[in-house]
Image (tube, rainbow, N blue to C red):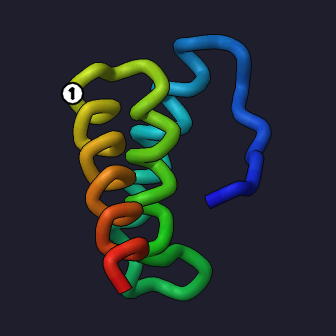
Amino acid sequence: MGRRIPIPRSRLARIAGGIGLVVLGLFGFLPVLGFWMIPLGLLVLSYDIASVRRRRRRLAVWWNRRRHQR
């Protein structure tokens, strides 16, 4: 989306942070935590996990095709 978010350089820290965001996002009904944390966690995980990366790329291609059809 044209924005950059700094993420840790350590692979282990990225995976732990991504999993943490996804797990905490499941408690989105609580104050402060939110369901917005789930896609952000998956985005962080997509840098290190190939299956998540493929889904992110498919979503980006689908989104661009849909956006340019209008």
Image coordinates of residue 67 in percent, x first then y, are 40, 75
Q: Say which element carries label 1.
A: helix
* Residue depicted at x 61% and y 80%: 32
Image coordinates of residue 39 in percent, x first then y, are 41, 59
Residue 7 lies left or right of residue 16; in this view the side is right
Instruction: Indicate the quadrant where residue 19 lies.
Output: top left
* Residue depicted at x 21% and y 27%: 51
* Residue depicted at x 25% and y 46%: 58
Image coordinates of residue 10 in percent, x first then y, are 66, 12
Q: Nearer the viewer, residue 65 or 56?
A: 65
Q: What residue type is labelled 1?
A: Ser
Say few, some or many: other residues with alpha carbon within 10 Å of mark 1 (under 14 / 14 to 19 / 20 or more).
few
Residue 8 lies left or right of residue 21; in this view the side is right
Residue 44 lies left or right of residue 59; in this view the side is right
Q: Quadrant of the C terminus?
A: bottom left
- Residue marked by disc 1: 51
- In the image, residue 45 above or below residue 65: above
Q: Which of 16 and 55 is in front in this view?
A: 55
Image coordinates of residue 16 in percent, x first then y, are 49, 29
Count of numbered marks: 1
